[in-house]
Structures are given as C-alpha cells and as structure tokens.
Amino acid sequence: MGLTGLLAADPTQLLPAREQMAFTLGFHIIVVPFGTALPFLMMVANYRGLRYADRDALLLAERWSKVAAVLFAVGAVSGTVLSFEMGLLWPGLMGRFGAAYGIPFALEGIFFFLEAIFISIYIYGWKRLRPWPHFWSGLPVVLAGVGGTASVVAANGWMNLPGGVTVRGGRVVDVRPLEVFFNRAFWYEFLHMFLAAYIVAGFVVAAVYAVGLLRGRRDRYHRVGFLIPFTIAAVVTPVQVLVGDLVAREVFHREPVKFAAMEALQHTRDHVPETLGGVVVDGKVRYGVEVPDLASLLAGFSPATRVQGLDAVPPADQPSQHLVNVVHLSFDIMVALSLLLLALVGWFGLSWWRRRDLPPSRWFLRGAASSGVLAVGALETGWIVTEVGRQPWTVVGLLRTVDAVTTHGNVWLFFTGVLIIYMAVGAGTVLVLREMHRRWQAQDDVVVPYGPPERGSPAREAVPP
C-alpha cells in the first residue's frame, strides 16, 4: 500500500501523532546518554584526581557534573512532555494496556527522583564534603541512570515482544510484573542501549576537547579532557559492534517482520544477499548494492539459512513500502556510522599501542571532533529501526497503531505548541552550555575543588581525606 492509500485508510490524527512522537522522542533520546553515562565519566575523572593528585581531572569532574545537571534538567522537561503524550496521543495504548505498560515507567520515575537527589548532593558536596565521601556520593547517580535506562528499554521491549499479561475480550485481566519488565526483548535491547549511551556520551564530550586541541589548546587540561571520555568510548565501541551483531540475530529469531524490513526482503528465501542502500519500488529493491549470501550467513551462520520475507505476513499486518524503506535505510546508516567510529577507535588504539600517544595527524582530531555527531546519528537511526520496524503495531500482535491513536482534538495544533517549546528548550540549553564554556575559558585563576593547588595558586588548601 502506498502512502496515499495508507493515509486514506488511517485516522486523520495518525500522521500528526506519529510526527510529534517521532520529534519529541528523537529530541529526548539525545539527552538520555548523558543522564546514563556522563555521571560515570565525571566519577572516573574524580577518582583520577583523588588517586593521583591530578588537579586537571578534578576540575574536569566538577565541570562535567554541572553539565550533567543542566542536561538532566533538559531531560526532565522533554521526558515529562513524552509522558503526557503517551496519554494524550495514544489513549488506546494506555487505556487497554496501562496496567502493564505503566510498570516500567513507574520504576523509571523512582530512578529519576533518585538521580535528581544524588546529583544535587554531589554538586553541593564539592566544597562541603570530604573528598572520598563526596566521590562515593556520585555512585547512586550512576546506578540510578542505569536503572532509568533499563526501565525505559523494558517498556519499549514489551511493545516489541509483549508478555506477562493475560488478555480477554481485548482487556488485560492479569499482569505479572516481572514478566512485563524482563520481557523477551529486554536483555538484548537494554545491553544495546546501555552501550550506546556510553558511546554517545564519550564521543560527544571528547569531541569538545578535540575541537580545542585542533585550535591549538594543547595544555594538559584539554588532553585529559579528551582522553578520559574518548578512551571509554573506544573500549565500548568494539563491544557494541559485537553486541549489535547479536541483537540483529535475536531480531531475526524473535522479530522476523522487523528483520525483513531491515533487509528490505520481500520474499522468503535462502541465500539472501545483504543489500547496501537501495529502496523498495513497486515491491522490488532498486539502486542497492548486493553482497551475495551475506544476510543469510549473518542470520544463521550459513548461506542456506532461510529468512522470512514480508510475503509471509498477512497483507493487513505488513508495514507499508515507505516504512520498509525508512527502516532499511536507517539500519544501513546505523551500521555505516558504527563502522566509521570503529575505524577511528582502531586508529587511536594502534597509535596508543605503538607510541603511547595520540595519532599525530590532524585528520585524527578532525575525525574525533566529528565523532560526537556520528555517534548521535547512529543512536537516532537505531531507535528509528526499533520503533518504525514494529509498525503497523503499537503492541505487536495485540494493538495496532491505528487503534491506539487519539481521535479527538487537533494534534497538528498540539504538535506546533510542542515544537515551539522544544525549540526554546533546545536553544536555551545551547546558550547555557556556551555561557558556561565561555566563563570557564575566561577564568584566569582556577580554583580546584579540594586540591591539590598549583604552587602559587590562590586555590584553597586541599581538604584532608
């Protein structure tokens, strides 16, 4: 079914509801990695500062904690809007399955408040707590970020592979909370997202200092500020590539329709090639480059592996052609960006192994300065795959998207208002972070939170441990 036919058959509110949800989720997902992984980066810097009397690392930890607080506040705003949207835009989902779907979000709220409390204690404690107790006050922030991420992923995984509920007459009559949370998609989705958060936060933070190094700021502060986040991202990236391969194989076994959309596979067959690029036009993939047998080989370790195509799905349950193209191209882009980051990490690792130093080429720093954008792009396209790849279902096998969407009001007007709010929040975030950066650069005498101060520095004496 083409786009015209799809719109003619769907409720009038479906398109604006989808567009609004895509926009707000796409905005929010950029902030999520910083709530999950940036606290870990600041704790690594804090530990290094205390363990090795490294004043640059301590200063970085303090400043990163303030950035984390700003982005946490932004995530709170964007996440709250998303919570309202779930009820306003998708009453069919919340009305029928809120008893199950709400469980992970209730837990996410608890983790959210814990993170808010302890990030406040950590920032407040820089000049008021003894060094090591202050350091350990940051650990709950890290753990709460992991718990919040797990909760959101549990909700998404439940939509992909629902379980833990008994449905009679279209209504939930029994809920098993542990089965809802630890659904069949939870573990591979959570691990994939958890690693992605560390990759995004690591590369984005490192990119800031890579730009500084490119501009000639070769002091130790910028070097340490680059090495801590980039090294963490460099360690995680190859692991993520292996996990991504595992996840794709799990999708092949558990979500065959999504896998068929990822491969743009129209007909069930074996010896399936991996199609790079290309779009589906009139039921056939055009303009792509085929690598013979590769999709079957990756799916089942054999070229003879039989892969289910979209033709095995009843027409009413098939994603539309344009949605298949969105999923297929997003998957290709995600993989391509991940391989670019892996190549950059390999360059860094080889240089460090040989010279114990960064690659001397400015092209490496240019690549590192771009790595944050590449990582965010991979994150966004990955979420497009998991969200759009589920269509035409909101809860696979239980609730169609056309039955979940609201039929009241003017969603386009609502979307316009949300768009204005998000633009203001986004612009405000950029301005605040730029002002913080400008103020930090303008400081002539830097006061280290609890030492050790440089000789002759006006920094206060180190607090005894």
Image (cartoon, rainbow, N blue to C red):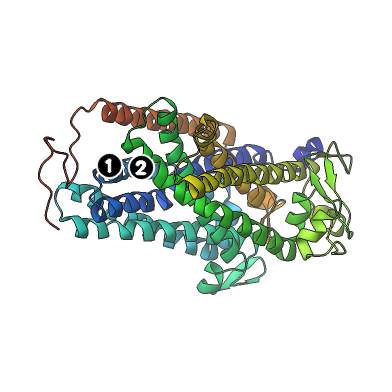
Above or below — where is 167 with respect to 426? Answer: below
Say which of 14 and 439 sits in front.
439
Which residue type does callout 1 highlight? Asp
> How busy is the neighbourhood of tag 2: few (under 14 within 10 Å), some, or many (20 plus)?
some
Residue indicated by mark 2: 224
Residue 51, position in %: x, y? Answer: 25, 56
**Type of the residue with mark 2:** Val
The residue to which callout 1 is attached is 56
Badge 2 element: helix
Query: Circle 1 — which element?
Result: helix
Q: Is residue 410 visible?
A: no
Q: Is residue 268 left or right of residue 262?
A: right
Which tag, 2 or 1, sits closer to the chain's start?
A: 1
Residue 85 drawn at (x, y percent): 51, 45
Mark 2 vs mark 1, CA separation in Å: 7 Å
- The image quadrant that residue 170 belongs to is bottom right
